Amino acid sequence: MRTKPIGVVGLGIMGSAMSASLMASGRDVVGFDIDAARLGEHAGRGGLTAASATELAARCDVVVTSLTSSRALEAVLTGPDGLCVGDAPGLIIIETSTLSPDEKSQARHRADERGAVLLDCPMSGTGQQARSGDIVAYLSGDSSAAKAAATEILLMMCRAVYDVGTFGNGTRMKLIANLLVAVHNAAAAEALVLAKRSGMDLDGVLAAVGDGAGASRMLAVRGPLMISEDFSTATMRVSTFQKDIDLIAAFASDVGSPTPLFSATADLYRMAVEQGRDDEDTACVFGVLESLNPRP
């Protein structure tokens, strides 16, 4: 019996990378995106396409969603052309978007009403990392069978899959991880600006510091972009990450957790927005720091 294709809704930076990994693993992938250009690019990579999320759900048992907002997820789930139009018994939805815990819970409730199983499974990693399969999945949900089916698919596009327990823990884990991403990215930029201002060879600094106790994943991933000072090809746009910054702040506030380092770091990303860097990679905090005390 021929294996059904896997559905991917949302073919942006992360969704397109994940769908490419699935196809590289030999699976057929039906893609859908409201952006016709993205849909065309997916077809150009050898992917199958659907005219709507409803059509995609009819052709797939498992669907990966990668979306930018809770409004987009609501439309994809229960809109007029959504995945769960009518009943969707047995449909497994691997929801990878970064949203708030409450927004994920609301989405699960909508899916449950239609007989679908929605798993909360954000990804840790940039678009660049996703293209090489170097991302980590934080899988959470309350159906062991659905999680087992999801894990098989996730391992085709991720370096590792962590079952972090009950529904919602995936989002909590992602927000904790992104707090560190925000701080480490800014710390890498601050260190490289210091190296530049002191006349050091930045490629040498990156190699030496990256091999010592000061190493971090963000220094390794974003350090080369900072050195090049070309932030135009974004693997994580400032505009997208600003949404994550707001989610982390709200999450920490809700549980009463102090975040002095994160709060200081968040100001740099807000400055990036104020400087019109919305579409640049978050490595541009290097440029933001440079602008704070310009050299004569």
Image (tube, helix red, strand yellow):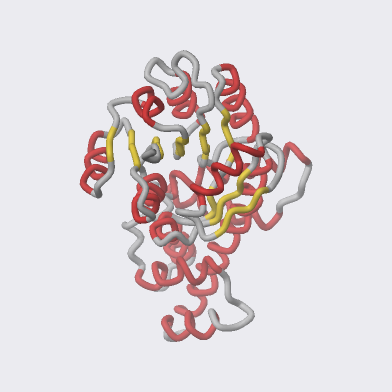
> Can residue 288 be seen in this snapshot?
no
Residue name at image x 61 percent, y 41 percent? 147
Left or right of 42: which side holds 2? right
Q: Observer-nearest residue: 195 or 152?
A: 152
Q: Position of residue 215 (x, y in %)?
A: 58, 75
Q: Position of residue 263 (x, y in %)?
A: 65, 51
Quadrant where the image shows the N terminus:
top left
Q: Is residue 146 above or below residue 107?
A: below
> Can residue 4 be seen in this snapshot?
yes
Residue name at image x 52 percent, y 38 percent? 94
Q: Observer-nearest residue: 239 or 207?
A: 207
Left or right of 194: which side holds 40? left
Q: Is residue 48 above or below residue 294?
A: above
Q: Position of residue 59 (x, y in %)?
A: 37, 29
Residue name at image x 43 percent, y 56 percent? 130
Q: Position of residue 140 (x, y in %)?
A: 64, 41
Residue name at image x 57 percent, y 46 percent? 245
